[in-house]
Image (cartoon, helix red, strand yellow):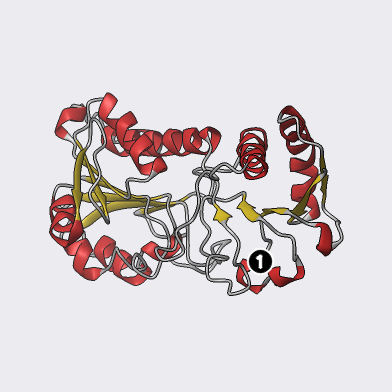
Amino acid sequence: MTTNVLFLSTPKRWAQYQAPLMRALAATGLDFQLSEDLPPEEVEYIVFAPAGRGVDHDFTRFPRLKAVLSLWAGIETVVDNPTLTVPLARMVDHGLTQGMVEWVTGHVLRHHLGMDAHILGQNGTWNQIAPPLARERRVTILGLGTLGSACGQALASLGFPVTGWSRSAKSVEGITCLHGADGMHQALACADILVLLLPNTPATRDVLNAETLAQLPQGAVVLNPGRGPLVDDEALLAALDSGHLAHATLDTFRVEPLPPEHPFWAHPKVTVTPHIASETRADTAADVIAENIRRGEAGEPLLHLVDRSLGY
């Protein structure tokens, strides 16, 4: 029997993913058909990377559909789709994880070492002030999923004291793990550098607001490579303007691309990076997609299934 796989995305992404997916699916030994144009009644698996709001797609058009396999780690644009009743898997792959580890580690070190002052120039002033050692700079990561845990462990291996916070109790080697409301307060209070890696759900939106920002130490730095809606933009700008925060380096935003008129662009204490902290890599993502299709056809549990009740 032929397994029919529909690539549901843009022509640009199809050109990027077609060859890696063909290679990865062929390696499974399955007899398969992969296309961006299949009759809806034949589709069994959808590789999904919506150009817009996935919640607007009508999945009832696919009567034989077994699973939707997202190419993105974030699935907030599709998780609430009422027509999606089959299993939904999000993307977790080592290429995406490594990309996030590199971005987070690079920017933590940048702020820890005070590299901006040297890069931007010192106007002939010889300020021979050495930074503290990593063991003296506390890092907190909100979100201890695959990405948060990997970033935390990488930073801990460099000597940073790392605290991680999650909604429920977790144990990650090398990281002091906290959870719940009390844990959030403790995690923020010890964050010289705060990294946001929570999913975008109703419970996490505006998690960094005026109240929580005030709990950070004076002179703290915020990094947001997670999701834009985690941050109350106006509250963040107010904390920067007041001097409570030293800097914010932001990779994700409520509206993307970030509008040219947004105050983040011109603010002297904000660094904008254009959602590059971690991109899904076609070669590594294809292996994850193919493995899930193999599992589905073998009657095995799918990897990285989304819990609809939690939204991730």
Tag 1 residue: 52
Place residue 8 in its image quadrant: bottom right
- Callout 1: SS: loop
Q: Is residue 310 left or right of residue 301?
A: left
Q: Residue 167 vs residue 50: left or right?
A: left
Asked if residue 231 shows in the view, the reply is yes
Q: Amino acid at mark 1?
A: Gly
Q: Is residue 270 above or below residue 235?
A: above
Quadrant (top left, top right, bottom left, bottom right) of the C terminus: bottom left
Of residue 128 and residue 67, the one placed in the foreground of this image is 67
Q: Residues within 10 Å of mark 1 (few under 14, many from 20)?
A: few
Q: Nearer the viewer, residue 121 or 307?
A: 307
**Residue at 76% in and 35% down:** 30
- Residue 285 is left or right of residue 200, and the answer is right
Residue ID at (22%, 62%) = 213
5 vs 85, left or right, is right
Image coordinates for residue 59, horizontal then vertical, percent: 69, 68
The picture places residue 157, in percent across and down from the top left corner, at: 28, 24
The picture places residue 92, in percent across and down from the top left corner, at 51, 42
Across and down, in percent, residue 134 comes to: 21, 29
Report the residue at 19% width, 34% height from top.
161
Q: Nearer the viewer, residue 192 or 288?
A: 288
